Amino acid sequence: MKPTDLGVRRAFDVHTHLLPNGLKVLLVENPSIPTVSLTASVFTGARYDPEAKAGLAIMVSRLLDEGTATRTSLEIADAIESVGGAIETDGSFERIIATASVLNKDVDLGLELLADLLIRPMFPQEFVDKEKERTLAEIQSAQDRPQVVAGWAFNELVYQDHPLHRPSHGYPETVARITRPDLLDFHSRFFVPNNVLLSMVGDFRVADLLPEVQKFFGGWVSKPVVFPQYESPLKQTAKRTKFITMPAQQLNIYLGHLGISRTSPDYYALQVLDTILGGGAGFTARIPQRLRDELGLAYTTFASITMTAGMDPGRFIAFIGTSPENMKLATEGLINEVRRIIEEPVTAQELQDAQDYLTGSFVFAFESSPQIARFLIHAEVYGLGFDYVEKYPEYIRSVTVEEISRVARKYLDSENYTLVVVGPVAEDGNLMNGAE
């Protein structure tokens, strides 16, 4: 079946423009509805946080719209809400994103506000204080959730000294150290036009919009960006285990190891493998079918190696939430399914089902202008090409049974893995209160 048969448009007609100051702009005319979606991506994030001040990048992202040199936080909110629009900021390990959605008649206002908070944020002290309190409260709340604690411990063991070992929001002691000058310094280092990608999708004419982009962003002065350097993480060569005691009804078990980066040439074969092993939504994959449906061990379970792939290698994760008395059986079940897909070819029917699921669900990633705007940035960062919409089904359909066996042997490891268990279990791995 062709992409167009699935309702996917052909390759987006993307207009690329580079401002003299280095700001790259991607534009797609989409007159289907009278709105415009603006997405600015700054290429920085928690991966560049100093270890002692982990959480800095996320705090910067959250405070961008809390006051600029020309507007207070309230004035920003009033300006965008008065025209029925929306403006949001967010951060991750790799990027800080600012988005604005407006009617086509208000695109100038959207550009003006976006430029204001990207170029001239003030990080008012009162909002810095509030944000630190909010972040500390979120961390404290997360520390009471066994699955989150398990995920954090898993990352610590898998990544060791690599920046991804820590939570993107930081630790209580590192958040407490962050100051307003830290935020201003971070902004000064990374928020420059030659480190930003702006994508715009909606009801406009490119020839009319580009002068407006130049008007609001053209005066932004470029300068070199010096990115902190760090060693690539190493895949483990022995087992690592950790048991954490928490009051809970179930055990949260994470099993896995270092994964792949998004640019891996084996990404698509591994995505099909993921679907067969750990499952997409509504898909009956091996681990859910065996551990949940047949053995009745799981409340929730999944596995994936491509889900966290990014600029840095992600993780291969097999997760199960289960009753304490099932700890040994559930852990062995995860390992057995990893070993089985390494040693035994998948069936032709499993391959067909996974390919049908992935190509069929793919169309829903491009239903709206904000989705397309974010895709353009994703495609640019990872060099996917703007004809990715057409090529993705071909990539998935070209995966063979033999290729899945090859990538399983190359990337999965049923011997040298990290195992983290959180719940009513002692540090030595024995269950608490004779639950076994």
Image (tube, rainbow, N blue to C red):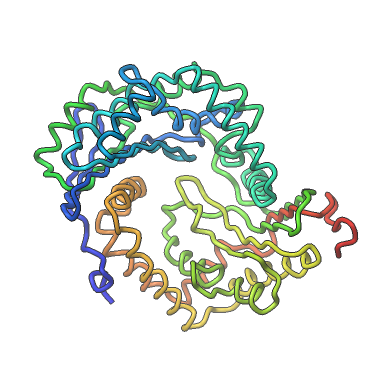
Horizontal side, residue 14 vs residue 312: left or right: left
Q: Choose between 21 and 251: the one closer to the eye.
A: 251
Q: Quadrant of residue 152?
A: top right
Q: Choose between 188 and 360: the one closer to the eye.
A: 360
Q: Residue at x 66, y 49 (%)?
A: 154
- Give the quadrant of the C terminus: bottom right
Q: Is residue 380 above or below residue 335?
A: above
Q: Residue at x 72, y 68 (%)?
A: 330
- Counting from the top left corner in percent of width and height, residue 412 is at 59, 63
Q: Quadrant of residue 231?
A: top right
Q: Choose between 273 and 129: the one closer to the eye.
A: 129
- Counting from the top left corner in percent of width and height, residue 372 is at 29, 52
Horizontal side, residue 373 vs residue 412: left or right: left
Q: Looking at this view, name the residue that lies furthest to the right.
A: 434
Q: Is residue 39 visible?
A: yes
Q: Is residue 118 visible?
A: no
Q: Residue at x 55, y 73 (%)?
A: 285
Horizontal side, residue 259 vs residue 12: left or right: right
Q: Residue at x 67, y 48 (%)?
A: 145
- Counting from the top left corner in percent of width and height, residue 388 is at 29, 59
Count of labels shown? Answer: 0
- Counting from the top left corner in percent of width and height, residue 420 is at 71, 53
Q: Choose between 401 and 11: the one closer to the eye.
A: 11
